[in-house]
Image: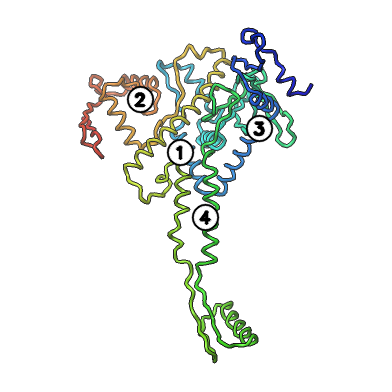
Amino acid sequence: MGILDRWFAKKPTADTHQPGEETRPTTESGRRATPEDQAKRLYATLQVDYSLRATILHIRDMDRRDGRVKRIHSKIARDTVKGGLVLQQAEASDVIAKEWKSFQRRLQLNRIEKLKSDAQGLVKEGNLPLQFVLDDEMNITAAVRMPSETIKPNVGASGRFADPAQAYVQFDLQTGKALATFPLWQLLLLRFDPDNFDDYGSMGRPFLDASRTAWQKLAMTEEDLVLRRRMRAPLRMAHVLEGAEDGALTAYRAGVEADQAHGVVTDYYSNKKGGVTPLQGDANLDQIGDVVHLMDCFFAGSPLPKGLMGYTDGMARDILEDLKRDYYDEVDVLQDTLAFGYAQAFRLQLLFRGLNPDAFDFTISFAERRTESLSQTTDRALKLRAAGLPQGMVYEELGYDAATVEKRRQWEEKNLNPYPNEDPIPNVKITPGNGRKGESGTHIS
């Protein structure tokens, strides 16, 4: 019996099989599976997803060859990690704050280069495998970014891990052999936009996965445009010598081409009936709309609107503002995905320290949730304060730890403020329709 026969020969569950009914393998969750699904799942347990590897390699090649793709990846990563990570606590805890500072320093999460590298990996590959490295004192000293095309989740037919002690396997893509296995706690796999989030074997998709076909057509069309311009754009001459013999015509052609080869601009003379007629080159190259169409198709599948990349012809400002808001929502999703991964690593560190992370109310997020200027962020925080939100939530909106800010404010109020009885919080008033584009204006007194 072959391996596929043994795979399909699984016993059906007793409560679903009736006498005389055709048996069919079922998944661990009870869903009826077709033979095609079973075969696909079987081969997925034996090797990595080579289609995902081909996609990742293609996108890396696009990033190296095309400055537009490189700028898309760089801008998304830069906007995602803007402001860095911040620990926010509902109640200030010196223990948690000390542990976070030490953890952030060891993993270099206070360096923008590390955060941007992780963000670019998630954008380009759609996955971010972080391997946790421990020292002898059970301290997490590094979160190493692994190549996601070599990682395979070891899941069963239901999409759940078959053995948490061997949750992930890293393969050698040259030989197809397993290099190492990782338990569930040691390797954290962050996935962006997987086909099925509940299936842990479903890997994420790169940002520009669906735009690869449009990019290939765009690159090919632009190359063809350059070749056509070189071949058809130059001005040419038609030399007609009526009644000339072959020898005379050959000598005449040799003389003309010699002058042209040396860049000599000269007149042409002939003692036979004929003439030199100029042939105009292709003068309509600027009217080719194929490139514009493919450019629109490419950026339609990109998270970045075309206007933010410098292509602003025919785009109204209001439309660009709407596209920017949509782009900021994508950045927020990326920030939440990355912040969750770093928070999980920090919770694991607290467990190694003998601390229960559920006993402390804290969150880890990026300081700036939106790609706004400092004045825009401050204006939004003042409006939230005027709307009646608690001051701690306003501090969190600005990207600060509310508990730390309040603790520092009380200390300064006690030791530095010469007028302790005055309210330090300003009075904020909002005037509807008094701002730019009909937005509300802010008045501070």
Instruction: Identify the secondary structure beneath mark 3.
Output: helix
C-beta proximity under 8 Å, tags 4 and 1:
no
Mark 3 and mark 2: Cα distance apart in space: 42 Å
Judge whether 372 appears above or below 347 on screen. Answer: below
Judge whether 263 appears above or below 213 on screen. Answer: below
Q: Bin the neighbour count of mark 1 within 10 Å (Cα to Cα): few under 14, some 14-19, many 20 and up.
A: many
Q: Which residue extends farthest right?
A: 1
Report the amino acid beneath label 1: Pro
Q: Which residue is mark 3?
A: 150
Ranked by sequence position, the earlier of labels 3 and 4 is: 3
Report the amino acid beneath label 4: Glu
Q: Is residue 160 left or right of residue 234?
A: right
Mark 3 and mark 4: Cα distance apart in space: 34 Å
Q: Which residue is mark 2?
A: 395
Where residue 389 sits, quadrant-wise, is: top left
Marker disc for residue 222: 4
Ranked by sequence position, the earlier of labels 4 and 2 is: 4
Ranked by sequence position, the earlier of labels 3 and 2 is: 3
Mark 2 and mark 1: Cα distance apart in space: 29 Å
Mark 3 and mark 1: Cα distance apart in space: 26 Å
Q: Bin the neighbour count of mark 3 within 10 Å (Cα to Cα): few under 14, some 14-19, many 20 and up.
A: many
Ranked by sequence position, the earlier of labels 3 and 1 is: 3
Report the amino acid beneath label 3: Thr
Q: Please state which of residues 262 and 243 is positioned toward the viewer in this rendering.
A: 243
Instruction: Indicate which label's residue lies in the foreground, 4 or 1.
Output: 4
Q: Is residue 429 left or right of residue 13?
A: left
Q: Please state which of residues 258 and 295 is positioned toward the viewer in this rendering.
A: 295
Where residue 384 sits, quadrant-wise, is: top left
State the image coordinates of residue 426 (x, y, percent, origin top left).
24, 26
Q: Bin the neighbour count of mark 2 within 10 Å (Cα to Cα): few under 14, some 14-19, many 20 and up.
A: some
Marker disc for residue 303: 1
Q: Is residue 433 left or right of residue 212?
A: left
